[in-house]
Image (tube, helix red, strand yellow):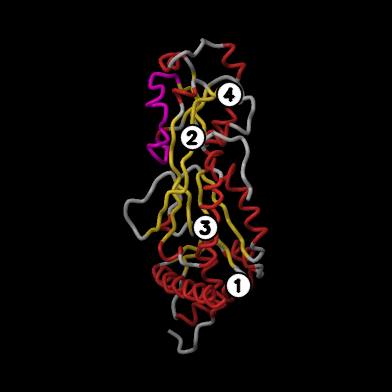
Amino acid sequence: MNSNSINWDNIRVFLAVARLQSAYEASNHLKIDQSTISRRLKKLEEEIGSELFTRNSQGHLLNANGHLLLEYAESIENTISSMESKLGGDSQVLTGSIRLGATEGFGSTFLAPHLANFCELHSGLTVDLLALPRLINLSKREADLVVSIEKPETGPYIACKLTDYKLQAYATPKYLNDHHQIKNLEDLSEHKFIGYVDEYSFSLKLQYLKNLAPNAHVPFRSSSLTAQLHGALQGKMLAVLPCFLAKNHPTLIPVLPEKTSFNRTFWLIAPSERKSVARVTELWDYIRHISSINQDYLLGDSLDINWN
């Protein structure tokens, strides 16, 4: 390693490129031109005395030395953030970026508008929302915190129950008028459903139909909950959907709500070393607050979102 001291600004650039896996994306994120990003990475590698990335057409991927530096750099970042939080008190202005992973429906429908408000309250922060139809991999540092339907059983994570939410079968009035009447669960076997692609169901908890309507015909399947929603809106099939998603579409009505409804749970999870970062803690607390005051909405008992 070079005897000269390492420049923290170069470490900041390294962290951005490591997390985004792209010098171009890091350039946009840090609002620094790409040539400066490349120059600072080269300087850092000279200071370290080793290359840190494998560069290819897919971007910048950390090599073994890069992963080692990332551990040290994130530890330093956490220490600085904690120090600023304790010394800054209530007057502290939070800065930096936070990457939040969430399930597709909850992230796009419920979290997104609230996150716009969060960013308005904290003008120094940038929030990246990964609303994806899969589990976000915290061990690969894909996010700083996630909302998931799966609670980790092991690993260096902090997890808390965020909220329960309700799902049930939905159809359009046109579909119900054009098809056999549904009076009980057994009648569902005579109807068509939209469901998940089994091998792309990232959790067994998504395989609702195996319990609800095991004999139903499922001619259309998708890994995307949004795709299932829009398929149901065409009035050709039924779909099992979260109430908070379906209630935004008046043309969808519950089918046997007293028999097809059931609850699931969202968990809020963060790596232990990231939870103590001031900006991550701020977003963690915010998500818990907005979920708590909207419990009735998420359970389908209220039509209105609480923005307070």
Please give left or right for residue 231 compared with residue 61 in the image. right
Q: Secondary structure at mark 4?
A: strand
Query: Mark 2: few, some, or many residues within 10 Å (few <14, many ≥20)?
Result: some
> Magenta span covers which residues?
199-217
- Callout 2: SS: strand
Among numbered discs 2 and 4, the one appearing first in the sequence: 2
Q: Which mark is residue 253?
A: 4
Where residue 52 appears, as percent x and y from the top left, is: 46, 71
Confirm or deny contact between disc 3 and disc 1 (CB under 8 A).
no
N-terminal label among 2 and 3: 2
Q: Point out the tag, 4 or 3, that comes first from the N-terminus.
A: 4
Tell me the CA gap for discs 2 and 3. Answer: 23 Å
Q: Which residue is mark 2?
A: 166
Q: Quadrant of residue 48?
A: bottom left
**Residue designated by label 1:** 92
Residue 216 in magenta stretch: yes
Q: Nearer the viewer, mark 4 or mark 3?
A: 3
Front in this rendered view, residue 148 or 29 = 148
N-terminal label among 4 and 1: 1
Estimate how packed mark 3 is, as few (under 14), some (14 to 19) or many (20 or more) residues with alpha carbons within 10 Å. Answer: few
Q: Which mark is residue 285?
A: 3
Q: CA distance from mark 2 to mark 1?
A: 38 Å
Residue type, label 1: Gln
